[in-house]
Amino acid sequence: MGSLSAGPVADFILEDFQKFHIDVSLVSAHAECALPASVVVSNISTGSRTILHMNRDLPDVTAEDFSKVDLHQFKWIHWEGRNAEEQVKMIQRVVAFNAALPRQQQRIVVSVEIEKTREPLYQLFPHGDVVFVSKDVARHFGFLSAGAAVKGLCGRLKPGAVLVCAWAEEGADALGPSGSVVHSDAFPPETLVDTLGAGDTFNSAVIYTLSNGGSLQDALTFGCRVAGGKCGFHGYDGIEKDFGNSLKTSKP
């Protein structure tokens, strides 16, 4: 679920979503607004990138937008930390929905990502069943490794939650309800080509594995494999080619 304006750029985005069979029925349309634009400058030698972003007047999804969503169709909902106060209201709606379900019915799992070092985003920590915290945020709090971060920040989570922190070439660590830290090494490509979106592919691979009954260790390892593989090519088309069989065989 997201916001989208009208125009040729929005049409391009929708066509791309359709190519990958992404359901856009819950997109909040704002015909009167202009779409934000980003220009990415990639370094061929190192694979690093510089992003020039122009944020115009397109609003984020609101709690009112989310109130129109039929929650019965979901088993997992993920929030990327943005307008946190509104997002907390959305999550509270999911919590109330879960509480009203019959005992035997599956609850919706809530995950949140706290990527930016912005104080308002930190209120999301206690609202996720699974919380992804970025290297930048971990370092902002004074932690120098993923392992130290998940141990040091776990007190901000609700009881029973999972905390995940990826640390680029150092791999990723996670801490689950057992209190034990699990780790996966990184899986760098032979040639670093494009790191844009590596974090998002990591998060999605972790969520995919956990939502299909995989262990936290399996999820962390698969997340690092997919993110590392993605860094070896431009864009995202290669993910299905390289990991399609893994995605099919991991379903229950």
Image (spheres, rainbow, N blue to C red):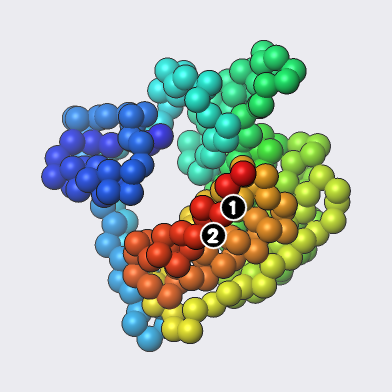
Dot 2: element: helix
Residue in the foreground of this view, choosing between 110 and 190: 190
* Residue 107 or residue 214, whichever sits in front: 214
Question: Could you tell me the amino acid type at mark 2?
Answer: Ser
Quadrant of the rendered image containing residue 240: bottom left
Q: Position of residue 161 (x, y in %)?
A: 74, 41
Residue in the foreground of this view, choosing between 118 and 172? 172
Query: Mark on residue 250?
Result: 1
Q: Residue at x 72, y 53 (%)?
A: 216
Q: Which residue is mark 2?
A: 246
Neighbours of disc 2 within 10 Å: few (<14), some (14-19), many (20+):
few
Residue 122 showing in the rendered view: no
Identify the amino acid type marked 1. Ser
Instruction: Indicate whether 207 appears above or below 62.
Output: below
Q: Position of residue 176 (x, y in %)?
A: 78, 49
Q: Quadrant of residue 34?
A: top left
Please give left or right for residue 23 compared with residue 108 in the image.
left
Left or right for 91, reference 49: right
Which mark, by number, is residue 219?
A: none
Contact, CB < 8 Å: mark 2 with mark 1?
Answer: yes
| Residue 116 point in image, percent of width and height | 53, 52
Residue at horizontal 18%, vertical 36%? 6
Q: Relative to residue 107, is residue 40 depicted above or below? A: below
* Residue 193, visible in the rendered structure: yes
Q: Depth check: 54 or 159 in front?
A: 159
